[in-house]
Amino acid sequence: HLVGRRLGGAEIPQELPATLLAAARAVAGLPVPDAMPPAQAPGDALGSWVIPPDRLREYGSIFEGAAGADAELLSAAEARTVLERSGLDHADLAHIWGLADANADGRLSRPEFACAMHLTSARRAGGTLPPALP
């Protein structure tokens, strides 16, 4: 959510946080060093902010299935179709959307979609959704 912070006037850090770097490497298909510990989320919200590489690949496949292999963004309608399959109530899904749509453009990029899917999965497992993302 560095983009959102930058849009709000914050400075961009000189180095990516370890958790963001690990997620970016996984999305790009690059190895994630084992020595990089996942950041723990507060309470029972998620257990970890880091999405495991196998889950990122799974979420990427779901993204492509909903938007097409060459698509860079998932429309709200396309994302809704996927997220509603979770069986979560609309209040939870609305909150997840608000957390995941970092630039509030009403569409989800691949990383935003992965975030939404990770939050959805955690909520379905009984986790508490965080009020905000780190």
Image (spheres, rainbow, N blue to C red):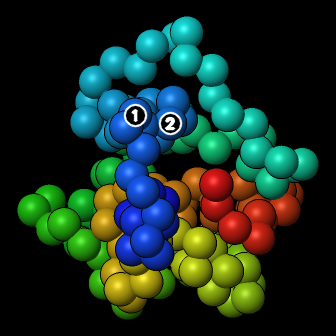
Residue placed furthest toward the top: 35
Horizontal and vertical percent for residue 60? 33, 51
* Discs 1, 2 touching: Cβ within 8 Å: yes
Q: What amino acid type is highlighted by mark number 1?
A: Glu
On screen, residue 55 above or below 126: above
The answer to which of 104 and 61 lies nearer the viewer is: 104
Q: What amino acid type is highlighted by mark number 2?
A: Pro
Mark 1 and mark 2: Cα distance apart in space: 6 Å
On screen, residue 4 above or below 46: below
Horizontal and vertical percent for residue 53? 44, 32
Horizontal and vertical percent for residue 26? 37, 33
Q: Which residue is drawn at 52% across and 69% down?
A: 100
Horizontal and vertical percent for residue 42? 83, 48
Residue at the disc numbered 1:
15
Q: Can residue 112 be seen in this view?
A: no
Asked if residue 45 lies left or right of residue 116, the reply is: right
On screen, residue 97 above or below 58: below
Q: State the mark number for residue 113.
A: none
Q: Mark 2: which secondary structure?
A: loop
The crowd level at tag 1 (other Cα within 10 Å; few <14, some 14-19, many 20+) is few
Q: Residue at x 25, y 61 (%)?
A: 64
The crowd level at tag 2 (other Cα within 10 Å; few <14, some 14-19, many 20+) is few
The answer to which of 31 and 84 lies nearer the viewer is: 31
Q: Which residue is drawn at 14% across and 59% down?
A: 69
Which mark is nearer the camera, 1 or 2? 1
Q: Which residue is drawn at 39% across and 52% down?
A: 12
| Position of the C terminus by quadrant | bottom right
Q: Mark 1: which secondary structure?
A: loop
Q: State the mark number for residue 17.
A: 2
Where, by quadrant of the figure, is residue 107 drawn?
Answer: bottom left
Q: Is residue 116 visible?
A: yes
